[in-house]
Every structure is written in structure tokens, then in C-alpha cells.
Image: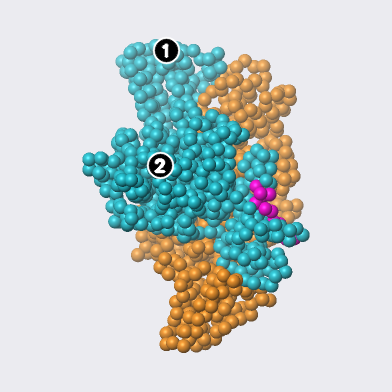
Chain colours: A orange, B cyan
Amino acid sequence: MEVTRQNFKEVLPEVCNAVQEADFISIDGEFTGISDGPSVSALTNGLDTPEERYTKLRKHSMNFLLFQFGVCTFRYDQNQSTYITKAFNFYIFPKPFSRTSPDIKFICQSSSIDFLASQGFDFNKVFRSGIPYLNQEEECQLREQYEERRGQMNGAGPVSYTPPSGTGVCNVPEDQREFIRSVEEKVEALLKNTDQTLDLEPCTGFQRKLIYQTLNSKYSKGLHVEALETEKKERFIQISKVDDEERRRREQQKQQREQEELNDAVGFSRVIRAISKSGKLVVGHNMLLDVMHTIHQFCGPLPEELDDFKEVAMTVFPRLLDTKLMASTQPFKEIIHNTSLAELHKQLRQKPFRPPTTECPEGLQSYDTSTEQLHEAGYDAFITGLCFISMANYLGSFLTPPKSHISARSKLLEPFYNKLFLMRVIDIPYLNMSGPDLQPKRDHVLYVTFPKEWKTSDLYQLFSAFGNIQVSWVDDTSAFVSLSQTEQVQIAMNTSRYAESYRIQTYAEYLQSRQKNTHSSRKWASDGWADTSYPSVAMTTASGYSHTDNWHQAVKRSISPSLDEQNHGADSSWTNYSVKKIKTEGSCTQTYADVAGSCDWPRLQADEGGASVSPVAEEAELDEFSANQSQGKRSRKHKKRKSDASETTPPALFDVPQVW
Amino acid sequence: MEVTRQNFKEVLPEVCNAVQEADFISIDGEFTGISDGPSVSALTNGLDTPEERYTKLRKHSMNFLLFQFGVCTFRYDQNQSTYITKAFNFYIFPKPFSRTSPDIKFICQSSSIDFLASQGFDFNKVFRSGIPYLNQEEECQLREQYEERRGQMNGAGPVSYTPPSGTGVCNVPEDQREFIRSVEEKVEALLKNTDQTLDLEPCTGFQRKLIYQTLNSKYSKGLHVEALETEKKERFIQISKVDDEERRRREQQKQQREQEELNDAVGFSRVIRAISKSGKLVVGHNMLLDVMHTIHQFCGPLPEELDDFKEVAMTVFPRLLDTKLMASTQPFKEIIHNTSLAELHKQLRQKPFRPPTTECPEGLQSYDTSTEQLHEAGYDAFITGLCFISMANYLGSFLTPPKSHISARSKLLEPFYNKLFLMRVIDIPYLNMSGPDLQPKRDHVLYVTFPKEWKTSDLYQLFSAFGNIQVSWVDDTSAFVSLSQTEQVQIAMNTSRYAESYRIQTYAEYLQSRQKNTHSSRKWASDGWADTSYPSVAMTTASGYSHTDNWHQAVKRSISPSLDEQNHGADSSWTNYSVKKIKTEGSCTQTYADVAGSCDWPRLQADEGGASVSPVAEEAELDEFSANQSQGKRSRKHKKRKSDASETTPPALFDVPQVW
């Protein structure tokens, strides 16, 4: 169902209802772009740490607009053995709702816009009829504004009768005295004649304030004073003769109207709050960016530190499941080789999987999976849910006796909770939202810095003696080089000692120097890209979340990174990893193996666990990356670097004849 | 006529033709926003110097996209006494044309987008069918890419036969040897069998390079090698058996195809180049932003210094005329009280003006002025031209004998050439593009800095002893305060000497400290707003313009600010102004009075000249400001500041009872 500004108010109760009844909810977002700085390949470096990835996405992806949001609710009907689905496709746009509302600026990336255009995205619908939204802080500000303005009115409440210590009242400036005198005359005339109301000429805000003040002190009992707008949007004052009761009634009406205006302004954020409040399982495909954007846009600014983000995210969405991570993990990774949403959906309709039966209640437009509407957020949310069900039910086949339906609350699914797919990271499959992240050994990795003219081929040249290497570009002048054997690291380090044009560090050294930078500056260390942080977009710069809603209390809790009681990593099957020790309050950080072990599921105790992700075609992954980059665009520079050979030959690390 | 990517190629010759034949050309642009930093009221401070205004617009307005461009050509038909008009409404979008093309990021301002949406702007058309464009530097880069790639091909040119000093050729790496060997085998087979062509499997860019290289050295004579794309956009190599002649023919075809691709990519910039080349009079309404955006987007990055910008602009558009400035100047300012485009157009259809008769050639959609299509760039350009004609013809009524038609080349118009309206500047009506700017005395102006809690009312309070004052906000903590009498300045300065919470400087002191800052840092001084400069949008960071087109030679010319031979200001009627002395090469900087004096036009020798602009309603002016801000939005803070009274009373400057 398409939801715009026109039908939002009408549809909202239905959405909230569907969320309340759901067994789980799937979501998907479409954005106006991916990266406002580095190329996508640099934004998703294969050797990013989780902290680095988060920092980069927070810095370079949040200034885009999430302008279509898909929500699909799934409720299992035991009697019919079918899922009742309700899909909503929301168009989102921060239409300024009044003169004083925030005027959001957002960035568009041409390639993303072009891609969405090619998919038939309806930009007119989003910009003409998008649903507005406010984050927490903006809502509070608006509420305060209403209250402040109410305080100026006469007859409204106690405030207007007792201006605080006199400073709120201003003297009438000389050039306004004549104006105010003429208003008083008109009011006197009104009181004497039989008219019920008097409309003054449009005037300035300051003049309106003076009028309120004057009438308040002179005629506080018999008049109702209200600012209205002409058709030309000019504000004028209407004065009505009323008795006390009538005045109270009018004030109440006005307050109700204002409350409604406020609700309208909060707009789509109310949907997110309903989902959050429900505490239901929220399913997405490659959903890290969706989660980040959702919080950034509808709740409040993202925290600087990854650990704080995890806490906030877990309070907004206490249970997340990423179908891309699920499909890339045992037992699915053996069977599923392309985890892009479209391909995954195709494969999960074939054996050994079974597509779930779904039903859409009458009156709600349902999606037809035979006519693909990929990259419409509502459709993508819908098929993400279908993928989840197919995979969940497949897990049931391992039980004794096998089960054909697995509930969204099943213990079998717990290993997949709160682990978000980390795109293109070579050796860390997921971001662990409810606990410490994996820390793979990177002893075979070198960090190399060099002149900006260097290309990939120059690095191959430099390391030509070592056989296969893997290059992950960090920025214009540095890259990670993974050697095939850890023993080669020391040889490379020794030999490079006197090099002038380049410099080699071990990964450990690199981490250390990075940490030093971070701590000395108390800011996230530079990620090698120009600082394009963009204050206007992040309207709310204060990091404080208000306490009005449940999720915001989490931010205030501090986590102490030195405590390490809950290190579940040691006894898990992630034998290749040391687990970073942070304390996560309360929430149990079960590893995949923990759960697998406890649920009678021997085949899942695979020796490799879910650690290594099945190789996925790079193009397909890019396609996943919020679906906007399927053409695999890179900056001209990076592209050139990879396809061309070097023009200036770098020094070979060893005296080995040129072999390539 | 609507022009999109679909019909651009077909329409372009007609556009160029119309430009060639025109007496003058009117233009208008629509942008995705106005300011990515300060509120519009701060962006257009009433006491900006021309340099400050330029710097602010360059910094805060150029990251938006000019996405609709209107061009209307006007040719006077002597026989019919009518203007033949051809209006074109171009949709512009930087669609990336290949994997390696720049991926432009641009900002959208919600209020602007919302305003355009309310005017029926077709966002789908712009994003789905917008015409692409390249600036000079991007075009050069693309050309180089083509040439580089051609160099890799065999048989193309001399480069491929003699790789420069061997470094361009790379050895075949070990892991590619088997691959290359298999290609060689296939080629050997092709040469022996009867097939004409051989399609290899898709492969990487590096592999393609190796193939070119290998085949080049082994079979340079009998084969044509070409990279093609599959339907899935994978690149593969096709090898054909050809004789020398056939190979040359193919290469030529290919070059032609590439040239066409290049032209397509340059796209809309070709229209701007045609207009520029024609040297015709270009008319716009409140056109400073249009000119800046046009140069920034289709020519190259805007220079840092205003004087350099003037030079570039005058080379791109050697003759500009701003109808808003014209309407705000004698003899029009007495008759025309609202200079917003829509109102101006209305007034110019009434006495004493006469609407011109126009005619639109068959087959070209003409605009109907009775059904307003305001804020469609093509329509706005059209009525801007109509306004210009009406005003020009009105000038003819002052001649003896009066003339009813005044040509666009008439001397009568020269006073208006190259003077662009400076929006909302109190005492400088225009930016003088072809000479030094006016420097009004600002002896009655104070520069006040204060805590950020202060509001306008606090300033009124502070200066309450001085009667009428005028406040122009600079940023959160400073403002200009214009006193009604210059003598008050010294009193204010003396009294404020021991103030702690605020600080007062004379305007001269302010200028001096600003200049100091400018020179010490060799950058434009801070305009009081956070630096949101956004490197990704300005794709081309190098400031160099290439020399391929006429306008780019101007930038390289240096202007020496110390020379002052051509100070035309002294003998002009701008008696209130000292003229800033800069040298402008060649172009004569005639002042309004110079020309008025020389053209037998006594009523124009008005004592006030064109210096003070007729009072224009603020809302109407905002509407003009690229037409996107008609709701007069301001940041919440600024709005609040102006409508509310102070909560904390600031110290009164003098011990005078509170009078306002």
C-alpha cells in the first residue's frame, strides 16, 4: 500500500495495528545516495574494523535522505498455515510545515538518483506528497514553541497573566505608540457596537506581541484574541467578544488543533516509534545502513562511538535480523552462492527451500512476486520477509522430528539475532549489535603508504616476490596488502627499512598509531578523506536524546570498556578470533555456537562457524548496498588505478627480476 | 519548448541557430536550493560589501544543482514590428554517462524543493530525462581518457607501436600467463580457420590490457582488436581479421563514435558555449545567482576573488542586463514599486508602458502569458525578455522625436549593461561587472558583537536613546546597527568603552580588522558561518581553466589591484560614493550618469542617480531570490529573534528610562 502525506493520517492506525499483531516486521529504505566522500570501494574497505566502518558510514552516508521506507508486517495464521502480510510503502520528505520549522538540506548522489530513476522511482510523489517527520529534539523544540506562543495569548493560562519578573513585557516603542493607540480605539468601538468580531490589518510579529500585551492588561476578561492567517499567509489578529466559558472553549479547541499540528509534523517518525515500542523482531536485508539512517533521521543524531551506537540501536530495535548475514552463514552458505536480495529470493523458492504461503487482507494492495518491483522499498521489505521465512523454516528440517514451520520467536533463530552484515569486510562477517565484535588476527596484513601516483599494479610490482597478494585501498596514498603467508611479513618489513618512496607498517603498528591519533585528538581519527561533515543536514547538533521515549534512556547509560566479565568468545567456535572485551549490560551475547550447541542441532556445529562468508560477486554486493550502486561506480581515479598499468615503475622490494 | 535528453540532439541546431539570429537572449535558472549554511536573511545582509556577498554566495549557494535552464531568444522583425521569440525549457541532470564519469553530488534544500513542487515542477522529468553536461576540465579529462584508451588499441595510431621507453608495457604476471597463452591459441586458430571474428570471454581491464599488448606485438598487421560490452555491461574483446584498409576504416568509425559520445557527454554545456560565443546581450531578472551557477556548473569552478569572477563572467557573457536592476533605477523606480518578476511583468503591461507584440514560429510551443507558468525557467526567461523590451521601449519616449521601438543595441541601454542587482543591500544597488564597485560611506554604521542569546530587541534596547536604528544581522553574535545620525557614532563608541557583554566598532574599524584577517590567512575571511565547503560537489578542484575556449583565457590574465588609472567614479553623479579603484582591462566602465549625460536625456540626470533602490517588500524580494524562497523562511533562531521580546534585558547603553 502506498502511503503519502494525503492518506497517512488515515492509514496510521492500520499500520500501528498491523505492527502490534505482527510476528515480525521487515523493513527497507531507499536513499538519495551512498557516499558523499570516498568511492564506494573505499567506503567499504575489505579490512575495515567495525569501528572504522561505522565511522565512515556515519560521516559519509548520513547526509543523504531516506526518502522511501518499506514496512511489511507478517502474522502467522495457525489455522490456515499461512502468513498474513501487510506491506506499506511510505514516501518520506521533510516538507517544512511552517515558517519556523527546520529547513533540512540533504545531498543527492547522481548515480543513485539515476539508478532509482531507471527503476521507475516516482520522484514527484516523494517531493510533492512525502510524509514529513521530526526527530525527538525537533519535536521537543516545536512543543516548546507552541507553549511559548500560548503563553503570549490572553486568557490561555496562568502564564499570560503573570509575566515572569516583568522582563517578558516590553514597553511600547515610540514609533509603535500611534499604532497601538489606533488598535485600542478600534477595540473600544467593538465593545460598544454590536459586532462580535474585529479583524485587524496584518501586522508584524512584534506588533502582534504588543497588541496581545496591551489587550491582556486592559481587557483580559471580555475578549478572545487570536492570530490568524490570510490567504496570502499574512498573519493578522482577530478579536472576539466572548464570555469566560466561551473563551475557555476556544482555547481548548486551539490546543487540540495545535496538538494535531504537532502530530502531523512528527509524521512518519510515529511509525518508527510504533515499531520500536512493539519490541518485535525487525528483519532487513543488508540492513546496517537502513538502521543507521532510520535512527539518524527519525530519532536523533548518531553517537560518535560504535559502542554507543549499538546501545542506541538496541533500544530502538531490540531485536534485529539481517537476511544477508543469515544467508551467508551455515547452513545456508553452502547452498546459497549469491546473497543479493533478488537472487536470494529466487533461490529460496527452489529446493531444498519452500516458498511460504502468504495472504494479503482484502483492501490492501499486495505485491506480486512474479512481476518484480525491486527497489521499491515496500516490495523489498516484502520479499525480505519471505526470504526470512523460507530460511527459518529450512532450519526446522534439522529438528527431530522435522518441523515445517518455525516461528519468528524460535530459539533456532537466536544465533542470527542482532548481527548485521558487514559488507565486503574480508574477515569479519557481521557487526555484533548486542556484544563485542570479532577481532580476527591480521598478522599477514601490511599497511603501506606511498606517493599518490601509485596504482594497484605498483603494489603488485613491489610485492612481486611474494606470490599472491590482496590489495585493499584505504585512500589515495595508502592501502592494506594481505600476504598469503604470515612469515613473509617480517621479510617485507626488514627489506623496506631504507625505502624512501614508500613505508610499510604491520597491521598491529597501524592499529596502534591509529589509536594514538584517536585519543590525542578526542575525535575519530581521519579516515583519509576530506572532512565533509555537513552541519546543516544534521539539524540537531546536540547529542542529547530526550527522555520522552523508551529508547532514549539507553544513551545515557555509560558502558565501561574495561570490564570483561562476559567474554563469551573464548569458548565459542570462532577459534580464529579473539573477542574484543566490552561490557554489554544485561543483554546476553550468545555466539552462534552457543545457541547451536544448546538446541540439539549437531550439523550446525560446523568447524568454521559462520566466520567466513561465502564468496559473493562484487557487483551483486554493490547492488545490495542500499540498492543504489548496482553499476559499481567508482571514482575515476580508483577505476583508473585498477585497470591501467603503472607509468612509473616503483622500486621492487627485492632484487627479483620483473615477473609480471 | 521542452528539451530533455530525448530530444536534445535534435533540437540543439535549432537552439544554436536561434541564438545566432537573436537580438538578445533572456535566461533563467531553477536551483535545488539557495543556502546550505546561513539563513537567507543572513546570506543577504543589508550591509554586505560586494566582495562579502560574492564570497557568501560562492560558498553557500554553489553546491545546489541548477536543474532547469530557460533560454528565450528574441529577434526583432522590422517589417512586422514584432519580436520573434523562441523559448526553450531545458531539464538538466548530471547523469553519469559511464563507469568512469564523475558522480556529482548536489544538495537539496527542502523549502526550495517544496516550493517548486507546489508550482508543479516535474522532478521525474529532470531526474529521468535531464540533459547531462560537463565543465571544461571534465571534458578535457574525458578526451584524454579516450585518447589514452585509443593508445592501447592496436593499429590505432603511432602510440601503440612504440610504447614510451618500455614502462607502459608490463610483463605478464605469473597468474595471467595461462590466460594469455589460451588467448594466443584461440587467435592462432582464428587465423587458420574461416571465421572472420572471435569474441573472447569477458575479462578484467588488466587482462584486456595484456591482450592488447600481446596481440599488438605479435600480430599488429592482420587483426583488429576492440573492446565491446555485453548486454550485462561486461566488457569483452572482439578480434577480427582485417586488412590494413579495413582496419583504418574501423578505427575511423570508432573515433567518430567516440567523438559523438563526447559531444553527448558535454551536453547542455554546448548551449552555454553557443550563447557565450555569440556575444549577444544576455538578459536576466535578479540574475547574479544565475550567472554564478551557470559558470560554476558548465564552465569551471568560480574564482575565489570577486574581481577574478568579474573577469571570467565578462568573458563568458560579455554583455549582461538585469531587469530587476533596471526596474529599480531611474526613470523606472518612480513608477514601479514592486520589482518581483511577476509583478513587474504585470505593471509593464499597463500605462505608461506598452506590452510588446511577439510571435512564435510555427512548431515551437509558445507561452501564454494569460496562464502564468511562473517558475518554469523557460517561461520566466520569456517574460523577463518581455519586461526588458517594455522598459527599453519606454526609454524611447524620452527621445526627440520619441521612438516606440528601441533596439537591444541602443546606446540608451548602455547605462544598464553589466550591472547585476545586489539583493537587499541597503546602499549598493548593483554589482558592477565591468568595473569597480560603489563604496558608499557607512559612517553611521556600527558593528556590534554580543553574546549569542541576544535578539533584535536587545539591540533596540541597547540603542534606545538614539531613536530609529536599523539592525542587519551578520551571524549569531554580531550585527550591523545603522544609526540615523552619524554624530551619534562617537557617543556610542565612547559610552561603550567599558562594556563587558558587548563590543562596538565603527564600520571603518570593522573593515580594517576584516582586511587584516583576509591578508594574514590569504583566504577569504570567515563570513561567520561554519565552513561547509563541500569538495565532492565541486568535482573539479583545480582552478585552472583550459584554453580551449575563448572565455577561459580571461582567467589567466592577472589584474593588478594597485593601478588606478580608470577611476570613472569621480566625475559621475554617484556623489555619495567613493569608487574602489581597481584596474579593469580594456572594458570601459561607464557609469549611469556618464551615459545619461551623453545621450541627451536630461530627466535621467537625477540627483540621486540609481543609488537608492525603491523600497521593495521583503517578501517579494525573497520571491525573486531564485524564486525558491517565497515563503520567506528563516532559521528558527533568526525568526524567533525578531518576533519575540528579550527574556534577559541587556544593559542599556545610556541611563535612559526604558522607552520601548
* Both labels 1 and 2 in a single chain: yes
Query: Which element carries disc 1, helix, strand or loop?
Result: helix
Residue shown at 57% from the left, 37% from the top: B582
B606 relative position to B263: left or right: right
Pointer 1 chain: B
Q: Tell me if I can see residue B456 in this picture.
A: yes
Residue A310 is a magenta residue: no
Residue A436 in the image, given as x and y percentages of width and height: 66, 50
Q: Using the image as rendered, state which of residue B417 and residue B150 is in the foreground.
A: B417
Residue behind mark 1: B219
Distance (Cα) linking label 1 and label 2: 76 Å
As displayed, is residue A218 above or below residue B175? below
Q: Tell me if I can see residue B302 in this picture.
A: no
- Mark nearer the viewer, 1 or 2: 2
For marks 1 and 2 on the same chain, the one whose residue lies earlier in the sequence: 1
Residue B502 is a magenta residue: yes
Pointer 2 chain: B
